[in-house]
Image (cartoon, rainbow, N blue to C red):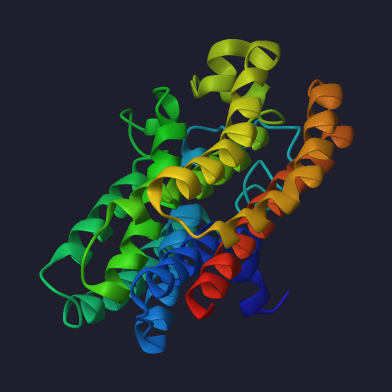
Amino acid sequence: MNTFKLWIKAARAPFFTGVIVPVLFGSSLAYYDTGRFDWLLFAVTMIGMIFAQAAANLANDYFDHKTTDDDINPHFTPFSGGSRVIQDNILSPVTVLTGAIVCWVAALGAGIYLVFNTPGYWVLLLAALGFIGGFFYTATRFAFSYNRVGEIAILICFGILPVTGSYFVQTGHFSWLSFWTSFPIGFLITAILYVNQYPDYEADKAVQKNHLVVTFGKSGGRAGFYFLIFGNYAAIILVVLFAGLTSYALIALLTLPIALKTLRIFAREYEKIKEFIPAQAGTIQVHLLTGLLMSAGCVIGAIL
């Protein structure tokens, strides 16, 4: 495996949709709401967010190794259980942590550029909040994922912050529209985290990683996943009706059949591993397609 492919694997690049979607939506929302769109600022925002997520992924792998969470997990899947580069002796823990630091520095560089090209120091504040969420998700005994607030941290860091931040970068101001419309995106990225906790359940429980699935158990925790999936669609309708989002964003409801199929698999196979993988893949698909369609709706609304 060449160096580039190795770091793509270590950083879990296929999951970069977790930041690509909210940045794309927040920027498209700004275009719909104000008619403003700066391609350079958009590109720098996207690159910075990708480096920030890569850093968080690498750091999480390092700290999940330190707690032995990933090491003792026999039920890892293509979507959960970490990148496995440490467990397979491909990269040393120190190398993975060093990679995280390099990515954070790159993200900081993008943030500094945005600070000089946007009003005030709001971008640095948003970046600082994102760093806290990414680092403390698994780091130290105060880690969010070990103290039943990991899901909230993900909703904020991969929903509210990138959507409102991308909107701010394009417009120079915040808006309630960008805040409320961040929730559908936030619900779905949290659903990805949530569904991935099921195969990791035994290992997470052993190291006292007390997320909501460990807290309520596999059966009792199912309601949380249903809430996130259906909450996404309810939120889309509500922000169109009451928050001023263009009605063209309702094309995102076209993903509902995929979501229902995913929910059926989830409900039937949540106690299994191999059979459960399509539920993980389906959740990622719903997040990606919903975000793309909401973004397209904003662009259509702006043009028409």
Q: Is residue 105 above or below residue 246?
A: below
> Where is residue 205 drawn, in percent x and y?
58, 19
For image coordinates 40% across by 63% down, the residue present is 52
Residue that protrudes farthest toward the right in the picture: 275
Q: Is residue 263 above or below residue 254?
A: above
For image coordinates 50% across by 54% down, the residue present is 57
On-image quarter of the C terminus: bottom right
> Where is residue 243 drawn, in percent x and y?
39, 48
Q: Is residue 283 above or below residue 170?
A: above
Residue 172 visible in rendering: yes
> Where is residue 6 drawn, in percent x and y?
65, 70
Residue 89 visible in rendering: no
Q: Quadrant of residue 267?
A: top right
On-image quarter of the N terminus: bottom right
For image coordinates 21% across by 66% down, the residue present is 173
Q: Quadrant of residue 98?
A: bottom left
